[in-house]
Image (cartoon, grey):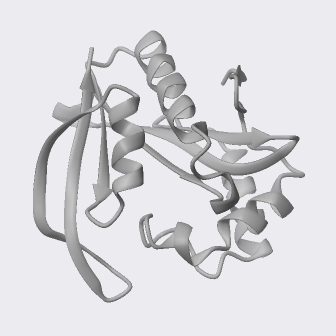
Amino acid sequence: MPELRLTSCTLRPIRPGDEDSIARYADNVQVWRNVLDRFPHPYTLEAARSWVAHCQTHEPQTHNFGIEVDGAIVGMIGLESGADVHRRSMEIGYWLGEPFWGRGIATEAARAVTEYAFATFDINRVQAWVFGWNPASARVLEKAGYVLEGRHVGAVTKAGETTDELAYAIVR
């Protein structure tokens, strides 16, 4: 997997030594509130160690980049390949540490990873889902060229609260 040097950050593979910064920025209830339940909370150093070890294994269906700012991993962005009839689709997902919100980092990273996906893989679309209470993430995708395709009413329950799920995609 390549290293992508952008204006606001560098996207690179996760490697041993990233555990402390991952735990520092991932251990935030505002981050956790907007990601899948498989993302732990609290996000401990042990969880970060487990994630870094996981990233060292080659899984052909996933492509995870750390978002590096000033030498520290402050977030993650990744792609997951679809399977079967969805084999020419990928899903993009991301999180960014709260101190880095509002700087355009997530938008620049989403654009770069989307371009990487279309240039590297035989795919026709990249898609994403956003919780209805997260308009900032929806705006990231819109600024990266994604289009709102639909709203799944009441589709997500997180932390005991149910909300809509917004479906976004960009097609080659």
Seen from this angle, which residue lies furthest top? 119
Quadrant housing the N terminus: top right
Front residue of 103/33: it is 103
In the image: residue 99, left or right of residue 15: left
Residue drawn 42% across the image and 66% down it: 36
Residue drawn 69% across the image and 59% down it: 99
Seen from this angle, which residue lies furthest front? 102
Find residue 60 and report its horizontal and vertical position in percent.
51, 34
Find residue 116 and report its horizontal and vertical position in percent.
51, 18
Residue drawn 79% across the image and 73% down it: 45
Residue 84, compared with residue 133, is above or below; it is above
Quadrant housing the C terminus: top left
In the image: residue 29, left or right of residue 46: left
Residue 116, compared with residue 55, is above or below; it is above
Find residue 160 and report its horizontal and vertical position in percent.
32, 89
Q: Is residue 81 visible?
A: no
Seen from this angle, which residue lies furthest bottom? 160
Residue 8, compared with residue 168, is above or below; it is above
Total number of numbered discs in the rendering: 0
Find residue 32 and report its horizontal and vertical position in percent.
52, 71
Residue drawn 58% across the image and 80% down it: 41
Q: Is residue 161 visible?
A: yes
Would you identify the image quadrant in which residue 68 lies?
A: top right
Would you identify the image quadrant in which residue 157 lies?
A: bottom left
